[in-house]
Image (cartoon, helix red, strand yellow):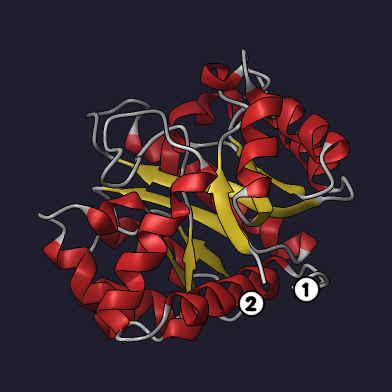
């Protein structure tokens, strides 16, 4: 049985000096699978992700243009380049994609929605799961995903809304991505979501190097910190840590369509 980090960013420059050492360490800590999420072609994130999937047996990848970088896709050639990346052997999802309204018009909301839908169309055509990024944009995210109800599935990453919105996404067949925020004392809304959501519809993720859980909040995050999320989730569900590890690992393999060997 191993721990599955379903969303990481080891391509980030903060790992440039010790990436190999960190990945070797987390594997020794019981992390048996990682999905590294590439977010940009122009910045090289997706290319670095592909390289990591080739170098490390236990690293898989996702490729998509994050809402922050969707101006890249105004160049139609980038859709062709993205599709080519998605056909790589160990790329298992299209993401992260979605909407981020936290910073006003950066990029413009209509541009974000245009390319969110463009990438959802690509996911449907390639029959790939998606990883959704939604920040301060619940209603628009939900409305666009509903256009593809029954046609796409995936994970709503770093879930930050309440139980009503969780129910909507669960009803659409999505999994809820639970990260380090769950360990924060003021995360009452997310704790309620974890109590509400079925265990077989949740996955765990670091979003490293960001979002480190307590007691390492504010530090560079890595997959070794998943144990703190597992402990909190187990406590909220009234089950053992082993039960959590087994369930969320099976869920990750299920949504990403990865063979569960070695579990």
Residue tagged by mark 1? 260
- Position of 53 with respect to 151 (left or right) is right
Give the percent coordinates (x, y) of residue 74. 59, 27
Q: Mark 2 falls on what kind of element?
A: helix
Residue tagged by mark 2? 250
Q: Considering only vertical position in the picture, is 61 above or below 194? A: above
Give the percent coordinates (x, y) of residue 119. 61, 49
Is residue 143 visible from the viewing direction of this image?
no
> The C terminus is located in which quarter?
bottom right
Q: Quadrant of residue 239?
A: bottom left
Q: Quadrant of residue 130?
A: bottom right
Give the percent coordinates (x, y) of residue 104. 22, 29
Depth order, front residue of 110/202: 202
Labels 1 and 2 touching (C-beta < 8 A): yes
> The N terminus is located in which quarter?
bottom right
Residue at 49% in and 70% down = 147
Q: Earlier in the sequence, mark 1 or mark 2?
A: 2
Is residue 62 visible from the viewing direction of this image?
yes
């Amino acid at each position: 049985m191993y721990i599955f980090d379903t969303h990481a960013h080891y391509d980030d420059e903060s790992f440039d000096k010790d990436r190999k050492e960190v990945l070797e360490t987390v594997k020794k800590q019981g992390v048996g699978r990682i999905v590294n999420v590439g977010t940009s072609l122009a910045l090289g994130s997706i290319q670095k992700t592909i390289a990591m999937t080739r170098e490390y047996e236990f690293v898989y990848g996702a490729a998509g243009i994050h809402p922050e970088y969707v101006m890249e896709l105004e160049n139609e050639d980038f859709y062709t380049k993205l599709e080519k990346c998605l056909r790589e052997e160990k790329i298992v999802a299209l993401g992260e994609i979605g909407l981020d309204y936290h910073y006003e018009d950066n990029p413009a909301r209509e541009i974000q929605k245009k390319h969110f839908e463009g990438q959802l169309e690509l996911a449907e055509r390639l029959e790939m799961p998606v990883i959704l990024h939604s920040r301060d944009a619940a209603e628009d995210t939900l409305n666009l995903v509903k256009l593809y109800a029954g046609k796409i599935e995936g994970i709503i990453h770093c879930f930050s809304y309440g139980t009503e919105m969780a129910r909507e996404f669960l009803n659409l067949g999505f999994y809820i991505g639970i990260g380090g925020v769950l360990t924060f004392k003021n995360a009452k809304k997310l704790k309620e979501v974890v109590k509400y959501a079925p265990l077989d519809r949740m996955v765990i993720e670091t979003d490293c190097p960001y979002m480190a859980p307590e007691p390492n909040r504010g530090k560079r995050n890595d997959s070794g910190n998943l144990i703190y999320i597992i402990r909190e989730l187990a406590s909220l569900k009234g089950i053992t840590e082993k039960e959590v590890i087994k369930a969320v690992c099976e869920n990750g393999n299920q949504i990403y369509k990865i063979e569960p060997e070695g579990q």
